Amino acid sequence: MDKVAVFPGSFDPFTVGHESIVKRALALFDRVIIAVGENAEKKNLFSITMRMKMISKVFEGEGRVEVTRYSGLTVEFCRKHGARYILRGLRTAADFEYERAMGHMNWKMAPEIDTVFLLTSTEHTPVNSTIVRDIIKNGGDASMFVPSSIIISDYLGK
Ligand code: PNS
């Protein structure tokens, strides 16, 4: 049976840190589903369609990566797709507390699904979508923080 991991997140925008996590996860799992969460409460910079487009561009030609959107519980999405693993990246101790709570709650709701954490590579530790968003909103050059195949202006305001 294929080992499938779901990599859930807002990805607003998808960063070099996310890209690196997915690439490394491909050595551990047969398939990785990047699941872009639709959270109506969050004020996003990039529309969900544009976020899916930018991520699909990064993994163009990589047949083991699927990009999709979802709403509702992550564990229900995993069950529907036969995924036994939730993949998350860990940068800092602050990340850990939030991830630990989510991991434990998800595990309580779905004990058959494990959360697997990969430490971000050292050079990506400071990169986070909130700050990247802020740089973009303020007219800065955020190209070094997103995968090289993403031209940020192609996805803004659409
Ligand atoms: O990139 P983010 O914002 O850290 O991703 C958060 C995400 C989408 C993984 C989280 O909000 C989530 O899982 N949302 C789906 C609803 C859900 O399952 N909530 C319970 C998690 S314990």
Image (tube, helix red, strand yellow):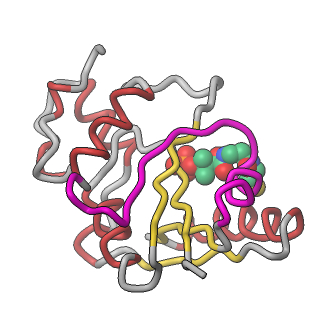
Please tell me in which quadrant of the rendered image residue 109 appears.
Answer: bottom right
Q: Is residue 70 left or right of residue 15?
A: right
Q: Is residue 95 left or right of residue 97?
A: left
Q: Where is residue 115 in the image (x, y as percent from the top left)?
A: 65, 74
74 part of magenta stretch: yes
Q: What stretch is highlighted in magenta?
A: 60-82
Q: Position of residue 132 (x, y in %)?
A: 29, 42
Q: In this view, does 154 lie to the left or right of 46?
A: left
Q: What residue lies at 12% left-to-right and 48% top-to-bottom?
A: 149
Q: What residue lies at 22% left-to-right and 45% top-to-bottom?
A: 57
Q: What residue lies at 30% left-to-right and 45% top-to-bottom?
A: 56
**Depicted 6 relative to depicted 74: above or below:** below
Q: Where is residue 14 in the image (x, y as percent from the top left)?
A: 33, 47
Residue sitting farthest toward the top: 157
Please tell me in which quadrant of the rendered image residue 16 appears.
Answer: bottom left
115 part of magenta stretch: no
**Depicted 100 relative to depicted 49: above or below:** below
Residue sitting farthest toward the front: 1
